[in-house]
Image (cartoon, rainbow, N blue to C red):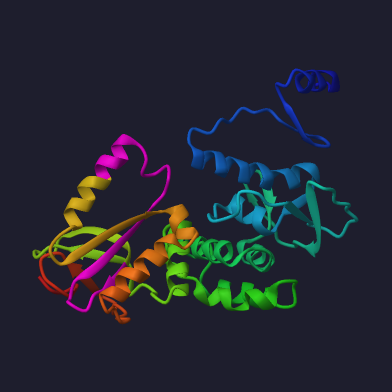
Amino acid sequence: MTRRQVDGRVRRKEWERVARGVCDAGVVRPGTVGEGFDLARRRTACLGPLRHPGTAAVSVGALVLHGVHGAPTRFVAEVAAVKAAPRRGDERVRVRRVLVPSPEEVDGILVAPVVDSLALAVPALTRLEAVAMIDSARHQGLVDDAGVRRARTLATGRRGARRSHAWWALSDARAESPAESWARITCGDAGVPPDAVQLRVVRADGRVVARVDLAWILPDGGVLLTEIDGRDVHSTPGALLADRRRQNRIDARCTVVRRFTGAEARDGTAARELARELDGAGWVPTPVPPGHSSCIERAGLVPDSWR
């Protein structure tokens, strides 16, 4: 297209000039609130390499392009040179003084590897954001335990590395969403760390009827089961019906079911309410051993080999 054609579309508000040399054609429209947040994150992540051709996205933007969840909705696009070359950043894109000798390509865009990106991102994030992103990368198999240890080592000496040093150990690869990560961490802060994450719930015949996000073993042998609901995933009529049926399957004499939103998980509301309930029940930590499930027809845990 000619510059005149591009300028005409920008002038008519058909396109938006995001940065020098970069326009947003507005072709993709989010269908839900969650999709809107994800689109905003990807839009920012793509901006850096588009604004500075030949560079690779790094830090939070690179993780977003890799498919890692839990990033803040708003962040500054960051890039680094694949080869040593002078680059000048601006208010929309930050140029990092690091080299990316082995960039990877995601959807046609150069990005730094997950390990290197975690090392740059974690010290600059909040604790909840950082742990959620580490959880997501591990859960999706984008990084293994050795990779997390390497990222932690690479982060040493960077601004924010000291305050974030202990965050790496808070990660749990079983978390299936950022909201679950937030709930687990805030419950730990409230003094009630979950006894189990992704606990399987079975019937007396051994049939698995559900897996719940977080669980606590109560002194009377019952189990407090907690689900963290995402806004979009659980808001459609079909999802609400499925949630109701699922809750009916796990709500029984030996179980207590509680549900919270992702926002309540993040701001600590869920943790405070659960702490009050658990304190009132006289709960004491009872970590669930591997290979055990909760039976809704029998108090206490049962081994997976039990039928």
Q: In the image, is 99 to the left or to the right of 281?
A: right
Is 125 contained in the magenta span? no
Q: Which residue is drawn at 57% across and 72% down?
A: 148
38 up-or-down from 154: above or below:
above
> On the rendered image, what quadrant is the C terminus found in?
bottom left
Q: Residue at x 41, y 49 (%)?
A: 230
Q: Residue at x 75, y 77 (%)?
A: 157
Residue 107 in sight from this viewpoint = no
Looking at the image, which residue sits at the far right?
86
Q: Position of residue 168 (x, y in %)?
A: 56, 74
Q: Which image quadrant is residue 125 in?
A: bottom right
228 up-or-down from 254: above or below:
above
> On the rendered image, what quadrant is the N terminus found in?
top right
Q: In the image, is 59 to the left or to the right of 130?
A: right
Q: Which residue is drawn at 57% across and 74% down?
A: 167
Q: Where is residue 262 in the image (x, y as percent from the top left)?
A: 44, 53
State which region is magenta: 215-242
290 or 237: nearer the viewer? 237
Q: Where is residue 243 in the image (x, y as percent from the top left)?
A: 27, 47
140 or 158: nearer the viewer? 158
Q: Which image quadrant is residue 101 in?
A: bottom right
Is 219 contained in the magenta span? yes
